[in-house]
Image: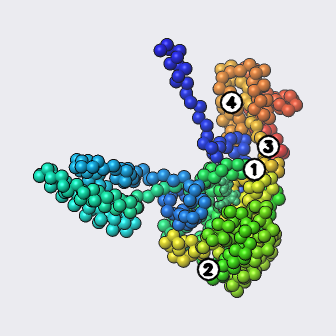
Amino acid sequence: MSEGAVKKEVKPRKFQAIRGTRDLLPPETALWNRVEQNAHEVFGTFGFGEIRLPIFEPTQLFARAVGGETDIVSKEMYTMPDPETDHIYGLQRSLAEWDLEVGNFENADSFQGLAVSLLVFIVRAQEEKVVGFDFEEVGFEAVSEMTLAVAELRGLISKHSQSGDASTWNLVAEQVQRIKLANDRLTVGEDISLRPEATASVCRAYIENGMQQLPQPVKLYYMGPMFRRERPQKGRYRQFYQIGAEVLGGSDAPAIDAEVIEMVMTFFDRLELQGVQLGINSIGDRNCRPKYVELLRAELLKVKDKLGADSQRRIETNPLRVLDSKLESEQGIIDTLPHIADHLCEECAAHYAAVKHQLEMRGVIYRENWRLVRGLDYYMRTTFEITAQGLGSQNAVCGGGRYDGLVELLGGPPTKGIGFAIGEDRLILSLQESGKAPAQQGRNVYIAWMGERAHATAIRAAKDLRKAGFSVELPPVEQKFGKALGQADKLGAKYALILGDNEVSEGLWTLKTLADGSQVKFAEPDLLEHLRKQRALSS
Ligand code: AMP
């Protein structure tokens, strides 16, 4: 092969970001920072502290908290075996896929060897208390069953190797089968998943860090990326960002619900988010919701034929979800269904009325939306959703609600809880669409220097200007003044500071305002003063 041909072949692959993920670039990232800075400030004024959470957690945490049946957990999570337990998965897979060769005792012996490795690994992991290797979770019965079968298999194989008698082959095959069945029943190790949301992690952290010992309620907020394998479209990504908050512990006083909502609305107000609409609802509690769900199911069954396939299925699995339907043909039917507000128990009705009153006291404008529901049992009473303009069909920028049973479901004490999650990508999109994004910020000062002496002065000037908070571009190599000014223009610099031999020897620096081309000479200290004054005037 000629050298040229080799070169062609090794042309490196061009990589692209994975579907549904994207790079956030300047100047857009300045807007992201502004949004996040405002969240820190506003949430801080409401007494919330920031919690930073792991990006991955045991899959089971999400299965338990978000619900194994939900789309998020059943279809959309990025899940992988924990590398620590990957070895054991390998062994299990080999056992499951083992093809026993009829009459081949050596082959059965290798199988037996693998089963022994698996058992040794499990027992050692149990002794070392490796997460996910609690015998109870692994399946104690299955471990004993496999141990017994391995012992029998080993006996049969050693008998054959001593006597050469092959008549026991059927018994060997039987033990192999027994081991395979036990293998199927073992649940060892743990899968880990990239977090699809953060409420589960916050609750886990609350329990794990003994936060119930702190003054209650504990008020936490978080921000960061979440991962869901959804179909990407505008406002919907596979890696997206949420800013959320949770109030855990203490009471479920309606003022807490109202204050949490007031906090999000204050945040949106501060960002001047346009077309903000808050919808609220109460979905009752364990007392009254089941009765409403039954009523809903009965009503839905009456109109089943007129519903689409998804909704028909949900009549059985989760009738509340029918209310989420966006299908045009179902809207008329849904309008005739009973409203949960008319079926709340006395306590829930009082709580809901008080939340609304509290919102009014805080000047928070809301709309009741009886179709706002959540499908999981531990969600209760207050639910809310906030939409904003410029987002098309994915116009929800925030979803939230009360989840008093969740901490308990994750092994903690009975704990009240309420929270929300803001979709930061959508929030940013909406701000951009309504022209609330900040204009691109150019450099303040471009230093056009020529000559070695001027370079030294330029370095010192850049240091001083940066210390005073100005954004400075200091070209790394000498440029002709004409070229330097062109470059300053392209970078959107406001000023060019011209430093040549004359300026350095006179101690008078030339400042050119690029917008109008005017030039003024300043002594070094006066220049800084002048720029400071100009900055104060323009802010
Ligand atoms: P959820 O955690 O599903 O209640 O979602 C809360 C908020 O996160 C939604 O209102 C959206 O603004 C945002 N969100 C959820 N999924 C996505 C996604 N795939 N891409 C972008 N934003 C999302």
Mark earlier in primary sequence (1, 4): 1
Residue located beneath label 3 in the image: 439
Label 1 – label 2 distance at C-alpha:
38 Å
Residue 167, x across and y down, in percent: 18, 55
Mark earlier in primary sequence (4, 2): 2
Q: Is residue 310 above or below residue 461?
A: below
What amino acid is at disc 1?
Leu
Q: Is residue 361 above or below residue 46?
A: below
What amino acid is at disc 4?
Leu
Residue 179, x across and y down, in percent: 31, 59
Residue 224, x across and y down, in percent: 61, 54
Q: Is residue 324 above or below residue 102?
A: below
Judged from the image, the secondary structure of the residue bearing numbered disc 1 is: helix
- Front tag of 1 and 4: 1
Judged from the image, the secondary structure of the residue bearing numbered disc 2 is: loop
Q: Are marks 3 and 1 in contact (CB under 8 Å)?
A: no
- Front tag of 3 and 1: 1
What amino acid is at disc 2?
Arg
Residue located beneath label 2 in the image: 286
Residue 341, x across and y down, in percent: 74, 79
Residue located beneath label 4 in the image: 474
Residue at mark 2: C-beta within 8 A of ligand 1: no
